[in-house]
DNA sequence: GCTCGCCCCAAGTGGTGCTTATGCTTAAGA
DNA sequence: TCTTAAGCATAAGCACCACTTGGGGCGAGC
């Protein structure tokens, strides 16, 4: 088995024409070169250099080996270059999956910052609901999943909590729920309201998880909400409320980039927080591009 | 520094998708694969594989490395192939330099036998006088020099003797000198003659060395030969003798392939032997193709 | 629920590669 | 011709590395 290290030595010897000079070039002592050449000749099974008095000459096998060494060592350094580029964030791809409507403000900021900080990297974006995005993460279809959970409700969804305990969970943002009522609603001009005050209203809910959580919170407030509509699409929720079809409780973030028409936001009591987190596999957290993207998401969350 | 051995392991892991399977394929234990992969990841500076439950997946850096590994390992095995071909005499070039007129019978036989035994090898042939051919050997312009010497005259050419003591000297043939006289010569019908009987004849000499040796031998026989012509070309010598211009003493080998016209050979007393030897450098004697050619020359000499 | 397969971890061991020190050979210069 | 310098080979000493064995945790399939 010929080793690349030996070829490096052989090439240095061939170029300099001397063991000592090769040793200086390689940064080791002359006997080391001597031994490596002997080992190489042994593994080659034939002499590679001939000592004619003072000067060194290559045998035909030696010439053949030097000829191949160029390509082999070039390929090796090319491979090291590429790996170093990926490790040094001058290259690398990250596949990010975000929950629908989570990509409105947070993800664009993070993507822009990532591109600015590491121009060589490429981040692709897909949308998927939290249960599905975790599946994709485990299945190797993405490197980062942006999801959310409601930490204030301990027993609400134990499966979802325990589902993440083998993942790297990076907190991004704590998002509070705000109430949204039609302009003509009796509470529209109030600064805040309790959940119980909305007990009799028709509700417009969000995604299945949000809907489940809404029910839990309302039940803790003493009533079961009557849910007339449910949609993943937050602009649709806002539109429905604006049309006077009901009230809603939705994340502040969902309102950050839109101005609700025909509806008013009010603070809800008690405060309910939704925690947005970025998830990845423990091994992937070590990949430079993934770690960098996690950092950018966390930084975007701090604004 | 990425090592080729590591790439081999990585490729096996990537192909089989399992450390254990890779270990079986490589003929070692599973922890060995584990350690090599860890070492490779350390020298790469970034994770290369991610363990997602049961299955192994490559990171982007890992994929890049596997992609390069194909070319690198292919180059490495190609180099090993070529060296093995040279070492195994399926390839290899030998440059042979022979003294003029030594290539008439000996060299063709040896070349033919070499080609038959090792079809992949290529032997090139040049002609040069012994002092010059040794120079070429030492200067790296050939691998084997076919030369001759007169061992019976110890003090004749001490420089020539000591000139060879650091070379590999392979005896090929002991060639005796025979006399050549015109058909009409008084000794033409004798079986043999002493040198002294030709003391008064005009001589036709060969190359400078042979000429020098002829003078030495004749002086030991009690006379100084009168040399009218001297030429390297043995057919010319034969022609000159055939034309009745003088007598000559020439190696039996020079007469092996030609039938002298107008001249007769007679045995000379005392017997003078010319030793034909093949010379090479000690290191080159280890080169398979050179060693094989030396063998073929020696075998040709035994016929 | 149990067993099997796979991977990681730790400790022991043999081998390998490097270094320093020394001797020999060769080439150049006085 | 003698001296000096440079270069290669060898030997001893030593550190390091890689492989092996044995044990444990974990997930998958019957």
Image (cartoon, coloured by chain):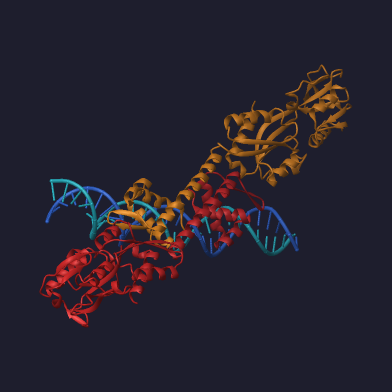
Chain colours: A orange, B red, C cyan, D blue
* Left-right relation of B19 to D12: right
Q: Nearer the viewer, residue B99 or B96?
A: B99
Is residue B288 shown to the viewer in this render? Answer: yes
Q: x, y (%) of residue A12? A: 38, 49
Task: Tell which residue pokes out farthest to the left in this image.
Answer: B222
Q: Is residue B191 above or below residue B67?
A: below
Q: x, y (%) of residue A99? A: 74, 35
Q: Quadrant of residue B112?
A: bottom left
* Left-right relation of B136 to B7: left
Is residue B155 shown to the viewer in this render? Answer: no
Q: Quadrant of residue A149?
A: top right
Q: Is residue A48 above or below residue B176?
A: above
Q: Nearer the viewer, residue A4 or B251?
A: B251
Looking at the rendered image, the quarter that the C terminus of chain A falls into is: top right
Q: x, y (%) of residue B138? A: 28, 58
Q: Quadrant of residue B266?
A: bottom left
Residue at point 46% right, 57% down?
Answer: A2
Q: Nearer the viewer, residue B128 or B265?
A: B265
Task: Tell which residue pokes out farthest to the top in this image.
Answer: A189
Q: Is residue A113 above or below residue A280?
A: above
* Left-right relation of B149 to C2: left
Q: x, y (%) of residue B80? A: 48, 59
Count how many numbered circles sit on residues in the image.
0
């Amino acid at each position: 088995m010929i080793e690349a290290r030996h070829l490096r030595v052989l090439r240095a010897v061939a170029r300099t024409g001397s063991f000592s000079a090769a040793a200086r070039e390689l940064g080791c002592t002359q006997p080391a070169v001597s031994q490596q050449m002997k080992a190489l000749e042994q593994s080659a099974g034939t002499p590679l250099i001939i000592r004619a008095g003072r000067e060194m000459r290559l045998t035909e096998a030696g010439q053949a080996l030097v000829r191949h060494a160029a390509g082999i060592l070039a390929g090796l350094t090319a491979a090291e270059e590429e790996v170093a580029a990926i490790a040094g964030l001058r290259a690398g791809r990250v596949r990010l999956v975000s929950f629908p409507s989570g990509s409105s403000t947070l993800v664009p900021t993070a993507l822009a910052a990532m591109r600015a900080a590491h121009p060589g990297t490429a981040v692709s974006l897909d949308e998927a609901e939290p249960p599905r995005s975790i599946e994709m993460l485990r299945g190797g279809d993405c490197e980062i999943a942006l999801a959310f959970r409601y930490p204030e409700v301990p027993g609400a969804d134990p499966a979802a909590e325990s589902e993440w305990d083998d993942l790297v969970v990076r907190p991004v943002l704590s998002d509070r729920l705000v109430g949204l009522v039609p302009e003509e609603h009796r509470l529209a001009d109030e600064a805040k309201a309790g959940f119980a005050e909305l007990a009799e209203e028709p509700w417009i809910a969000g995604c299945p998880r949000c809907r489940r959580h809404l029910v839990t919170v309302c039940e803790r407030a003493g009533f079961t909400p009557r849910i007339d509509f449910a949609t993943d699409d937050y602009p649709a929720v806002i539109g429905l409320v604006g049309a006077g079809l009901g009230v809603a409780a939705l994340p502040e973030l969902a309102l950050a980039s839109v101005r609700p028409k025909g509806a008013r936001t009010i603070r809800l009591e008690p405060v309910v927080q939704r925690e947005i987190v970025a998830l990845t596999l423990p091994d992937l957290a070590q990949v430079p591009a993934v770690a960098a993207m996690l950092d950018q998401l966390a930084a975007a969350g701090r604004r």
